[in-house]
Image: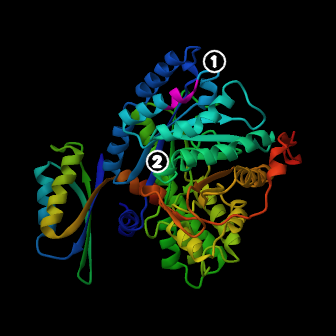
Amino acid sequence: MLETKDILETIHMIDNENLDVRTITMGISLLDCLDEDIEKACVKVYDKIMRSAKDLVKTGEDIEKEYGIPIIHKRISVTPIGMVTAPCQSKNPVRFAHALDKAAKELGVNFIGGYSALVQKGFASGDYALIESIPQALSETDFVCSSVNIGSTKAGINMDAVRMMGKTVKAAAVATADRNCIGAAKLVVFCNAPEDNPFMAGAFHGVGEADTVINVGVSGPGVVRAALAKNGEGKDITEIADMVKKTAFKITRMGQLVAKEASRRLCVPFGIVDLSLAPTPAVGDSVAYILEEMGLESCGCHGTTAALALLNDAVKKGGVMASSHVGGLSGAFIPVSEDAGMIAAAKSGSLDITKLEAMTAVCSVGLDMIVVPGDITPETISAIIADEAAIGMVNTKTTAVRLIPAIGKKAGEMLEFGGLLGAGPVMPVRAGSPAVFINRGGRIPAPLQALKN
Amino acid sequence: MKAIITVIGKDTVGILAKVSDACAKANVNIVEVTQSVLQDMFAMIMLVEIDKASLGFDELRESLDRVGETTNTKIHIMHEDIFNSMHKI
């Protein structure tokens, strides 16, 4: 029989340390829904989602009850709508956003991702119209999430798209200014976007994927922090890394089990487990607290990048053996507003946007859920996106930017979202103007790292 | 399928009897029991067979929740696989 201490450890992790499966995300291909008539296409999209995901929420809830593991979100990702809207020339793609939102509401899922365009090398038919419609789509829907991939190691960075996204992020915030600028919180700008990511707001169903697929995102910063708090005192860094690995292994095994079970019950192929430490605003469920547990006085002080690099790597090493297929973002997330420790560090001034930028070079995502002053210029947003994309492009990793311009607010004030999105202090940005650089347009050529053949 | 019932709380008279009673009423076979009392904290773990249970998993959980309320303990019932996958390679 199982060891008593192991059983009690699992129970303790769930009851007291916020162990959970963050999301079961069903990826659904919409490539068979293309139509020149946008109304017909929207009906096909709605029908396909309703048909494919009709049992998703119930299955998630059943697994949750039987296994006793909280599964926080059930989500859907779809083929980038930029492709689906391609045949519908000169029609406003926002109708697709409404079709997605309607399906999400009726199915009871928490988010639906894929109002997206992949424009790392250039705009195909449909992409331009889709990006222009993002602010409207995000302000008129509740559950739709949007992402745009503007660069990759192989393609370089599309600076025309970067310029456009600066305007789009600002416009998304302005369009939802009466709702805490929530539109911008549902919009991610990527470099090297993964095609099987189960996490929002950046999830979409890549074109190389199967017709439908189940991807699972695990979580568990609270568990890692508690393991270090219990056993970490006086240990050297090698031992700390080992503790993180062992804990990540256990968390991921749980995710793998849930993924396999969901896949079996839904008769949908299992895609990947995303080994991510995804924080929540709940006290204790914080990546920043893990870094502080390692011995930093406050997240953001010197040493933070090294501690995060160690954490990110150990999470992957522990998780990779625990799952048969690993994918998505897989690493440590550092979304400021969703992490109690990050919020505290940003408020106290210990953590600023430049330190966060350095941290993104060694973690799994990028500048995530960062609230910036409402009077930020679109060019400055574009420049922040370009900086992040450059880090991703050169390091052959995913980077993302999810900035929320807090319309009407200045540095030091707070913007409250509530729920998993949390609350964030408005963080100051540099004053110098990058306008001329951004307005040049064109493409940053792919780096030498791309030429591996 | 096998499930694991864990009971954690302050030690009082009759916890084992009440949990066993709830299992018997639901036609749940108890395969193995271990328990430990550390100071006055009580931790009991039962491996049970629920294939022939007369209640669904949900109802069984609710019935155990009620026992938890009357004995002032926290009772979980979870599929055995979750522990196997987390703690065995």
The residue to which callout 2 is attached is A23
Q: Is residue A128 left or right of residue A143?
A: right
Instruction: Decide whether residue A95 is among the magenta residues.
Output: yes
The residue to which callout 1 is attached is A87
Residue placed at 40% from the left, 40% from the top? A109
Please state the horizontal and vertical placement of residue A266, each as a whole percent of the image: 41, 33
Please state the horizontal and vertical placement of residue B26, each as a whole percent of the image: 14, 49
Q: Is residue A416 left or right of residue A444?
A: left
Of mark 2 and mark 1, the one earlier in the sequence is: 2
**What amino acid is labelled 2 in the image?**
Thr
Residue in the foreground of this view, choosing between A34 and B37: A34
Please state the horizontal and vertical placement of residue A326, each as a whole percent of the image: 60, 47
Secondary element at tag 2: strand
The overriding secondary structure of the stretch rendered in magenta is: helix
The quadrant where residue B13 appears = bottom left
The residue range painted magenta reads A92-97
Name the quarter where the C terminus of chain A is drawn.
top right
The quadrant where residue A313 appears = bottom right
**What amino acid is labelled 1 in the image?**
Pro
Work out whether residue A44 can be spotted: yes
Residue in the foreground of this view, choosing between A223 and A181: A181
